[in-house]
Image: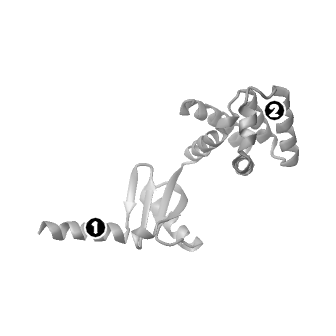
């Protein structure tokens, strides 16, 4: 396993190019497309990583993929670079580092919101606005559900947790009653 600093180096290089050219949204879509391809066909990454497969065969396969699933030139060059530097097996980790790098440069922080039931688009928008007021930064939210929290929300931004769940409130009440 290679260090996360290597992931970050590739991510920064791609971010430099895409932000300078204003290509970030399109490149993110391209990366998501290939992330899904590699997720659905893990044998592709295994073949790309295998020393038993000739380099020119790997390049041909990647070329065929790029012709079947076309992407921006920046994205195609990035995939070729990862292949030639024997880093394509870390594609998902490098993509994650890329998103984190671009978000940091744009002043966006990542957050995880957990609710008992899925939130609607309007509720998410209200939550994002509340978090913007609380943090002073745009928040990109990923969502999850956990019926054990009963109701309310739990938001994690970095190492900070905003816990407004009914489960936590009930546990706190139980703890206080047990002390008396």
Q: Secondary structure at mark 2?
A: helix
Q: Nearer the viewer, residue 57 or 9?
A: 57
**Image height check: is 100 above or below 115?**
above
Q: Which quadrant of the figure contains the N terminus?
A: top right
Q: Nearer the viewer, residue 128 or 42?
A: 42
In the rendered image, residue 16, in percent from the top left (x then y), is placed at: 67, 36
Q: Residue at x 39, y 52 (%)?
A: 160
Q: Earlier in the sequence, mark 1 or mark 2?
A: 2
List the residue tagged with mark 2.
58
Left or right, 48 with respect to 57, comes to left
Residue 24 in sight from this viewpoint: no
Q: Residue at x 58, y 43 (%)?
A: 105
**Image height check: is 70 above or below 151?**
above
In the rendered image, residue 24, in percent from the top left (x then y), is placed at: 70, 47
List the residue tagged with mark 1.
171
Real-space CA distance between mark 1 and mark 2, rounded to the nearest whole angstrom: 56 Å
In the rendered image, residue 117, in percent from the top left (x then y), is placed at: 50, 72
In the rendered image, residue 45, in percent from the top left (x then y), is placed at: 72, 39
Left or right, 136 with respect to 169, comes to right
Residue 5 in sight from this viewpoint: yes
The 10 Å Cα crowd at callout 1, few under 14, some 14 to 19, many 20 or more, is few
Residues tagged 1 and 2 counted as in contact (Cβ below 8 A): no
- Looking at the image, what colour scheme do you see? one colour
């Amino acid at each position: 396993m290679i260090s996360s600093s290597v992931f970050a180096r590739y991510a920064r290089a791609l971010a430099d190019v895409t932000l300078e050219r204003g290509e970030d949204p399109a490149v993110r879509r391209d990366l998501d497309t290939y992330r899904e391809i590699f997720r659905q066909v893990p044998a592709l990454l295994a073949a790309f990583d295998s020393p038993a497969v000739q380099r020119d065969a790997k390049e041909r396969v990647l070329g065929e993929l790029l012709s079947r699933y076309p992407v921006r030139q920046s994205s195609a060059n990035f995939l070729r670079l990862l292949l030639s530097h024997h880093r394509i097996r870390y594609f998902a980790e490098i993509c994650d580092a890329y998103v984190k790098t671009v978000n940091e440069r744009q002043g966006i922080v990542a957050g995880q919101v957990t609710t008992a039931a899925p939130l609607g688009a309007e509720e998410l928008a209200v939550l994002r606005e509340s978090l913007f007021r609380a943090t002073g930064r745009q928040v990109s939210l990923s969502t999850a559900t956990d019926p054990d929290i009963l109701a309310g929300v739990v938001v994690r931004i970095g190492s900070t947790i905003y816990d407004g769940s009914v489960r936590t409130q009930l546990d706190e009440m139980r703890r206080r009653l047990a002390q008396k």
